[in-house]
Amino acid sequence: MASKVYFCRTITPEKVLEMYKLLEIELPGNVAVKLHSGEKGNQNFLGPDFWKPMIDHVQGTVVECNTAYAGARDVTERHEQLMRDHGWATHFNVDILDGEGPDMQLLIPGGKVIGKNYVGKHLAHYDSLLVLSHFKGHPMGGFGGALKQLSIGIASSYGKRVIHGAGDADKHFAGDHTGFLEAMADAASCVAKRFAGKAAYISVMKNLSVDCDCCSDAEDPCMADIGMLASLDPIAIDQAGLDLIYAQKDDPGLPHMLQRIESRNGVHTVEAAAALGFGSREYELIEVE
């Protein structure tokens, strides 16, 4: 059955909230708001002013996890400082989910590559999940959207190494690439199922660089802004984002973006996620003004 994906070409903070309301869902209890806080030096991430109306509406807590690579977000104290430096802690309650151990372990009975996902233990404090994705390219995954937020984004620092290593944390970034993409799908599945019926997804196709917001030295955007997507299905919203990229045939930056996505076989994460059955690649795109 096709999932509904709403699409709007206008990109404003107010429109984000309008898109959310189209989903006709009220997220219950304590709402975890997963977004990308932006690595120190990154110029492309979407900041707190952009997301403020949306986060205020759900009275959510901005959640992040420490990185598995050296930088401003790999250690809790530095990560918390960056959250202050980037203004997140000024506007919102902030929670580094794996700021203290031990990790929460989520089982993945049908996982193709990993059978267990390691996430920040504070995830247990939340009743519902709002995923605010900045859809763009990614150095390893080809692209980053909702599935990346559910997997790498919510995994603890150790859990990130397990996913990147396709189940072997010691291999880390040197793990089998196809296994890494499938491990992302596995990890996303258990988080999506944990919050089934209590999660919403919004993706903003703006500042379209081939690099992720995790890059401190990211390329500037190569494509024009496209718009915003909203859905209750994380697989459908990522598939719609990819399809919209391919549809920009007159954009001179399209070949560069496609080289990044296709050279990393980015679509395989969506394929693997669909095979796990927690969403669908089939969707109805509903364009709104």
Image: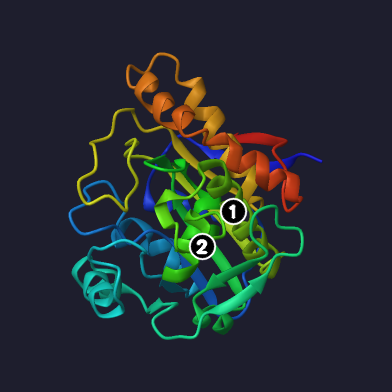
User: Label 1: few (<14), some or many (≥20) within 10 Å?
Assistant: many
Element carrying mark 2: helix
Element carrying mark 1: helix
> Could you tell me which residue is drawn at 60 percent across and 76 percent down?
105
| Vertical side of 190 occupied by 246: above or below | above
Q: Distance from label 1 to label 2 (Cα)?
A: 8 Å
Q: Residue furthest top?
A: 250
- Count numbered badges in the picture: 2
> Could you tell me which residue is drawn at 43 percent across and 71 percent down?
63
Viewer-closest of 189 and 70: 70
The residue to which callout 1 is attached is 183
- Measured as percent of width and height from the top left, residue 8 is found at 50, 38
Q: Quick check: 258 left or right of 193?
A: left
Q: Is residue 289 visible?
A: no
At label 2, which amino acid type do we have?
Answer: Val
The residue to which callout 2 is attached is 162
